[in-house]
Image: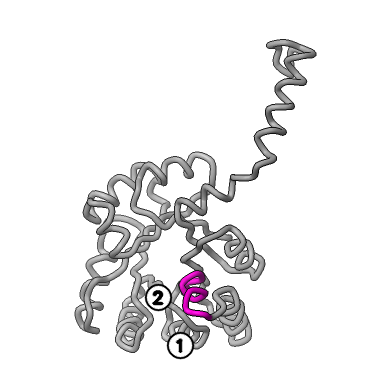
Amino acid sequence: MFELYLDTADAKHVARFNACLPIKGVTTNPSIIAKSGIGLNQLLVELDSILGKKACFHVQVTSVTVDEMVAEARKIDELPYNMVVKIPATEIGLAAIKQIKTENITVLATAIYSAQQGFLAALCGADYLAPYVNRIDAIGADGVGVVADLQCLLNQHHLNSKLLPASFKNVQQVMDVLKLGVAAITLPYDIAVQLFAHPSVQPAVDQFSLDWQTAFGNKRSFES
Protein backbone atom coordinates (compact mmCIF):
# COMPACT_ATOMS: atom_id res chain seq x y z
CA MET A 1 0.00 0.00 0.00
CA PHE A 2 1.22 3.49 -0.83
CA GLU A 3 2.81 5.38 2.09
CA LEU A 4 2.35 9.14 2.52
CA TYR A 5 4.70 10.99 4.85
CA LEU A 6 5.16 14.58 5.94
CA ASP A 7 8.70 15.98 6.00
CA THR A 8 8.47 18.17 9.08
CA ALA A 9 9.05 18.53 12.81
CA ASP A 10 6.02 20.76 13.34
CA ALA A 11 3.34 18.88 15.26
CA LYS A 12 0.66 21.42 14.29
CA HIS A 13 1.29 20.76 10.60
CA VAL A 14 1.10 17.02 11.19
CA ALA A 15 -2.18 17.38 13.09
CA ARG A 16 -3.70 19.46 10.31
CA PHE A 17 -3.03 16.92 7.58
CA ASN A 18 -3.64 13.87 9.70
CA ALA A 19 -7.21 15.10 10.06
CA CYS A 20 -7.86 14.85 6.32
CA LEU A 21 -5.22 12.51 4.87
CA PRO A 22 -4.03 8.95 5.61
CA ILE A 23 -0.63 9.98 6.94
CA LYS A 24 1.69 6.99 7.39
CA GLY A 25 4.19 8.94 9.45
CA VAL A 26 6.83 11.64 9.52
CA THR A 27 10.30 11.95 8.04
CA THR A 28 12.94 14.17 9.61
CA ASN A 29 16.61 14.97 9.25
CA PRO A 30 19.12 16.74 11.52
CA SER A 31 18.44 20.12 9.88
CA ILE A 32 14.66 19.84 10.27
CA ILE A 33 14.90 18.90 13.95
CA ALA A 34 17.54 21.54 14.68
CA LYS A 35 15.33 24.26 13.17
CA SER A 36 12.30 23.06 15.16
CA GLY A 37 13.86 24.10 18.47
CA ILE A 38 12.88 20.87 20.24
CA GLY A 39 14.73 17.60 20.69
CA LEU A 40 13.87 14.29 19.13
CA ASN A 41 12.34 12.76 22.25
CA GLN A 42 9.89 15.61 22.79
CA LEU A 43 9.01 15.60 19.09
CA LEU A 44 8.27 11.88 19.07
CA VAL A 45 5.98 12.20 22.08
CA GLU A 46 4.00 14.93 20.32
CA LEU A 47 3.82 13.08 17.01
CA ASP A 48 2.83 9.82 18.70
CA SER A 49 -0.08 11.56 20.42
CA ILE A 50 -1.30 12.77 17.03
CA LEU A 51 -0.65 9.81 14.74
CA GLY A 52 -0.89 6.88 17.14
CA LYS A 53 1.12 3.72 17.60
CA LYS A 54 0.94 2.57 13.98
CA ALA A 55 2.76 5.66 12.72
CA CYS A 56 6.26 5.36 11.33
CA PHE A 57 9.01 7.85 12.18
CA HIS A 58 12.17 8.26 10.08
CA VAL A 59 15.13 9.62 12.05
CA GLN A 60 18.63 10.22 10.71
CA VAL A 61 21.87 9.38 12.47
CA THR A 62 24.26 12.22 13.23
CA SER A 63 27.33 10.00 13.61
CA VAL A 64 30.08 10.07 10.96
CA THR A 65 31.90 6.74 11.30
CA VAL A 66 30.64 3.25 10.55
CA ASP A 67 30.86 1.99 14.12
CA GLU A 68 29.20 5.12 15.49
CA MET A 69 26.40 4.95 12.91
CA VAL A 70 25.72 1.33 13.77
CA ALA A 71 25.67 2.07 17.51
CA GLU A 72 23.39 5.08 17.00
CA ALA A 73 21.08 3.07 14.75
CA ARG A 74 20.64 0.53 17.55
CA LYS A 75 19.65 3.28 19.99
CA ILE A 76 17.16 4.80 17.54
CA ASP A 77 15.67 1.37 16.87
CA GLU A 78 15.22 0.82 20.62
CA LEU A 79 12.98 3.87 20.99
CA PRO A 80 9.38 2.87 21.87
CA TYR A 81 7.98 3.77 18.46
CA ASN A 82 7.92 2.37 14.93
CA MET A 83 11.31 3.72 13.87
CA VAL A 84 13.19 3.82 10.56
CA VAL A 85 16.87 4.74 10.75
CA LYS A 86 18.07 7.12 8.05
CA ILE A 87 21.65 6.68 6.83
CA PRO A 88 23.30 8.86 4.14
CA ALA A 89 24.11 6.75 1.08
CA THR A 90 27.84 7.51 1.15
CA GLU A 91 30.61 4.91 1.09
CA ILE A 92 30.71 5.01 4.89
CA GLY A 93 26.93 4.97 5.05
CA LEU A 94 26.66 1.92 2.82
CA ALA A 95 29.12 0.06 5.04
CA ALA A 96 26.98 0.98 8.03
CA ILE A 97 23.79 -0.10 6.25
CA LYS A 98 25.28 -3.55 5.52
CA GLN A 99 26.03 -4.05 9.21
CA ILE A 100 22.76 -2.58 10.46
CA LYS A 101 20.67 -4.83 8.23
CA THR A 102 22.23 -7.94 9.79
CA GLU A 103 20.36 -6.87 12.95
CA ASN A 104 17.01 -6.52 11.13
CA ILE A 105 16.80 -2.78 11.75
CA THR A 106 14.69 -0.89 9.20
CA VAL A 107 16.84 1.52 7.20
CA LEU A 108 16.27 4.38 4.79
CA ALA A 109 19.21 5.37 2.57
CA THR A 110 19.06 9.14 2.23
CA ALA A 111 20.80 11.96 0.33
CA ILE A 112 20.52 10.06 -2.97
CA TYR A 113 21.51 12.13 -6.01
CA SER A 114 21.93 9.44 -8.69
CA ALA A 115 20.29 6.20 -9.75
CA GLN A 116 23.51 4.24 -9.31
CA GLN A 117 23.92 5.55 -5.76
CA GLY A 118 20.40 4.42 -4.88
CA PHE A 119 20.92 1.08 -6.60
CA LEU A 120 24.01 0.36 -4.50
CA ALA A 121 22.08 1.23 -1.34
CA ALA A 122 19.36 -1.20 -2.39
CA LEU A 123 21.97 -3.92 -2.92
CA CYS A 124 23.20 -3.27 0.63
CA GLY A 125 19.70 -3.97 1.92
CA ALA A 126 18.19 -0.52 2.47
CA ASP A 127 14.44 -0.81 2.99
CA TYR A 128 13.74 2.70 1.68
CA LEU A 129 15.58 4.94 -0.77
CA ALA A 130 15.17 8.73 -0.69
CA PRO A 131 16.24 10.47 -3.91
CA TYR A 132 16.29 14.27 -3.55
CA VAL A 133 14.19 15.34 -6.53
CA ASN A 134 14.49 19.13 -6.43
CA ARG A 135 18.06 19.14 -5.15
CA ILE A 136 18.99 17.01 -8.15
CA ASP A 137 17.28 19.52 -10.43
CA ALA A 138 19.17 22.34 -8.68
CA ILE A 139 22.53 20.91 -9.72
CA GLY A 140 21.46 20.70 -13.36
CA ALA A 141 20.39 17.05 -13.48
CA ASP A 142 16.91 15.53 -13.81
CA GLY A 143 15.38 14.64 -10.45
CA VAL A 144 12.33 12.87 -11.85
CA GLY A 145 14.58 11.07 -14.33
CA VAL A 146 16.75 9.75 -11.51
CA VAL A 147 13.64 8.43 -9.74
CA ALA A 148 12.47 6.80 -12.98
CA ASP A 149 15.84 5.13 -13.58
CA LEU A 150 16.06 3.93 -10.00
CA GLN A 151 12.53 2.51 -10.06
CA CYS A 152 13.43 0.69 -13.28
CA LEU A 153 16.57 -0.79 -11.69
CA LEU A 154 14.62 -2.00 -8.68
CA ASN A 155 12.04 -3.65 -10.94
CA GLN A 156 14.57 -5.20 -13.30
CA HIS A 157 16.68 -6.70 -10.53
CA HIS A 158 13.74 -7.68 -8.29
CA LEU A 159 14.96 -5.65 -5.31
CA ASN A 160 12.56 -5.01 -2.45
CA SER A 161 13.66 -1.48 -1.54
CA LYS A 162 10.87 1.10 -1.59
CA LEU A 163 11.39 4.45 -3.26
CA LEU A 164 10.51 7.35 -0.98
CA PRO A 165 11.34 10.49 -3.00
CA ALA A 166 11.94 13.70 -1.05
CA SER A 167 12.84 17.35 -1.73
CA PHE A 168 10.05 18.98 -3.72
CA LYS A 169 9.52 22.58 -4.75
CA ASN A 170 6.28 22.27 -6.72
CA VAL A 171 3.31 19.99 -7.20
CA GLN A 172 4.32 19.00 -10.73
CA GLN A 173 7.43 17.28 -9.38
CA VAL A 174 5.24 15.35 -6.96
CA MET A 175 2.81 14.25 -9.66
CA ASP A 176 5.61 13.23 -12.00
CA VAL A 177 7.18 10.87 -9.45
CA LEU A 178 3.80 9.49 -8.39
CA LYS A 179 3.13 8.49 -11.99
CA LEU A 180 6.28 6.35 -11.85
CA GLY A 181 4.67 4.03 -9.30
CA VAL A 182 6.87 4.86 -6.31
CA ALA A 183 5.92 3.10 -3.08
CA ALA A 184 6.06 6.18 -0.86
CA ILE A 185 6.64 9.91 -0.81
CA THR A 186 7.39 12.58 1.77
CA LEU A 187 6.09 16.11 1.38
CA PRO A 188 7.16 19.37 2.98
CA TYR A 189 4.32 21.35 4.51
CA ASP A 190 4.11 24.01 1.80
CA ILE A 191 3.84 21.44 -0.97
CA ALA A 192 1.18 19.50 0.93
CA VAL A 193 -0.82 22.74 1.14
CA GLN A 194 -0.44 23.31 -2.60
CA LEU A 195 -1.96 19.91 -3.36
CA PHE A 196 -5.28 21.34 -2.18
CA ALA A 197 -4.81 24.74 -3.81
CA HIS A 198 -6.62 25.38 -7.08
CA PRO A 199 -8.17 28.77 -7.86
CA SER A 200 -11.33 27.22 -9.27
CA VAL A 201 -12.26 25.06 -6.30
CA GLN A 202 -13.58 27.58 -3.78
CA PRO A 203 -15.61 29.59 -6.32
CA ALA A 204 -17.31 26.35 -7.37
CA VAL A 205 -18.11 25.45 -3.75
CA ASP A 206 -19.38 28.97 -3.09
CA GLN A 207 -21.69 28.76 -6.11
CA PHE A 208 -23.13 25.46 -4.90
CA SER A 209 -23.96 27.10 -1.56
CA LEU A 210 -25.49 30.18 -3.17
CA ASP A 211 -27.68 28.18 -5.54
CA TRP A 212 -28.91 25.92 -2.72
CA GLN A 213 -29.66 28.77 -0.32
CA THR A 214 -31.52 30.66 -3.05
CA ALA A 215 -33.81 27.68 -3.62
CA PHE A 216 -34.09 26.16 -0.14
CA GLY A 217 -32.74 28.65 2.38
CA ASN A 218 -31.13 26.99 5.41
CA LYS A 219 -32.60 23.55 4.83
CA ARG A 220 -30.20 20.66 4.52
CA SER A 221 -30.33 18.22 1.60
CA PHE A 222 -32.31 15.60 3.50
CA GLU A 223 -34.86 18.23 4.56
CA SER A 224 -35.63 19.49 1.05
Give the vertical position of 136 relative to 91 (above or below): above
Give the labeled residue for mark 1. Answer: 120
Give the labeled residue for mark 2. Answer: 111
Q: Nearer the viewer, mark 2 or mark 1?
A: 2
Give the vertical position of 217 relative to 104 (above or below): above
Please provide percent x and percent y for residue 213.
Answer: 73, 15
Magenta residues span 130-140
Amino acid type assigned to the residue bearing label 1 in the image: Leu
CA separation in Å, label 2 and label 1: 13 Å
Q: Is residue 224 left or right of residue 12?
A: right
Quarter that holds the C terminus: top right
Crowd band around label 1 with a 10 angstrom C-alpha radius: few (<14), some (14–19), many (20+): some
Quadrant of the rendered structure where residue 145 is?
Answer: bottom right
Amino acid type assigned to the residue bearing label 2 in the image: Ala
What is the number of callouts on the image? 2
Give the vertical position of 89 relative to 81 (above or below): below
Please provide percent x and percent y for residue 69.
Answer: 24, 77
Proximity of marks 2 and 1: CB atoms separated by less than 8 Å: no
Crowd band around label 2 with a 10 angstrom C-alpha radius: few (<14), some (14–19), many (20+): many
First reached walking from the N terminus: tag 2 or tag 1: 2
Q: Is residue 57 left or right of residue 214?
A: left
Q: Residue at x 68, y 27 (%)?
A: 206
Please provide percent x and percent y for residue 65.
Answer: 22, 83
Please provide percent x and percent y for residue 132.
Answer: 47, 72
Q: Residue at x 45, y 74 (%)?
A: 127
Quarter that holds the N terminus: bottom right
Disc 2, SS = strand
Q: Is residue 52 left or right of residue 206?
A: left
Q: Residue at x 65, y 42 (%)?
A: 199
Q: Magenta stretch containing residue 79, yes or no?
A: no
